[in-house]
Image (cartoon, grey):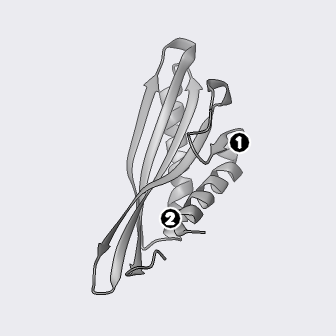
Amino acid sequence: MHIRGRIRKAIREAIAADGQFSGWLVLKSWGENVSDDDLPAAGVFTPRETSTLSTGSEADRITHVVVQARCRGNDDLEDKMDDASADLEALVLPLLAAIGETYELATTDIDIVGEGAARIGKLEMVFRVTRFTDEGQSE
């Protein structure tokens, strides 16, 4: 399995196994049909990787790891999303530390849509992990 696939799989498995996310649907893709009744849900994606030749034979590969979560809620929805982001950060960073030379949480975005009982919180966290590889090798 490609390194990006292993990253996604490790994070999905960690979310599914963590008690803070008990009862959450863990997705491979938001392309799956997810109704509001299926929430809370989380997904892990690696939509972007950049590669820069740093020496004559070594490349710096920066993989963007996106963790998205969606929850239903009321007035406390933003607080729920903040709590989920803190739990996800604590879960993801050690996994990235085991994979790359450098890693970070780059951005956290929270969006609340809807009104009243139909409010949905959308969380998107973008992590970056850098690996140093031989040129032409992804690992």
Q: Which amino acid does label 1 sit on?
A: Ser
Residue 14's place in the image compared with 122, above or below, is below
Name the residue tied to disc 1.
22
Q: Judge by depth and name the residue closer to the eye, 100 or 88.
A: 100
Instruction: Please report whichever mark, 1 or 2, sits nearer to the chain's N-terminal start.
Output: 1
Name the residue tied to disc 2.
96
**In the image, is 8 to the left or to the right of 110?**
right
Q: Residue at x 63, y 31 (%)?
A: 39
Residue 32 screen position, x and y as percent: 61, 38
Q: Which residue is drawn at 68% across and 49% down?
A: 16
Quadrant hosting residue 102: bottom left
Identify the image quadrant of the N terminus.
bottom right
Q: Which residue lies furthest to the top in this view?
A: 116
Pointer 1 local density, CA inside 10 Å: few below 14, some 14–19, many at least 20: few
Q: Which residue is drawn at 70% across and 47% down?
A: 19
Residue 59 screen position, x and y as percent: 34, 77
Q: Is mark 2 on a helix, strand or loop?
A: helix
Q: What residue type is labelled 2?
A: Leu
Residue 76 screen position, x and y as percent: 53, 24
Q: What element carries label 1?
A: loop
Residue 100 screen position, x and y as percent: 46, 71
Quadrant hosting residue 70: top right
Pointer 2 local density, CA inside 10 Å: few below 14, some 14–19, many at least 20: many
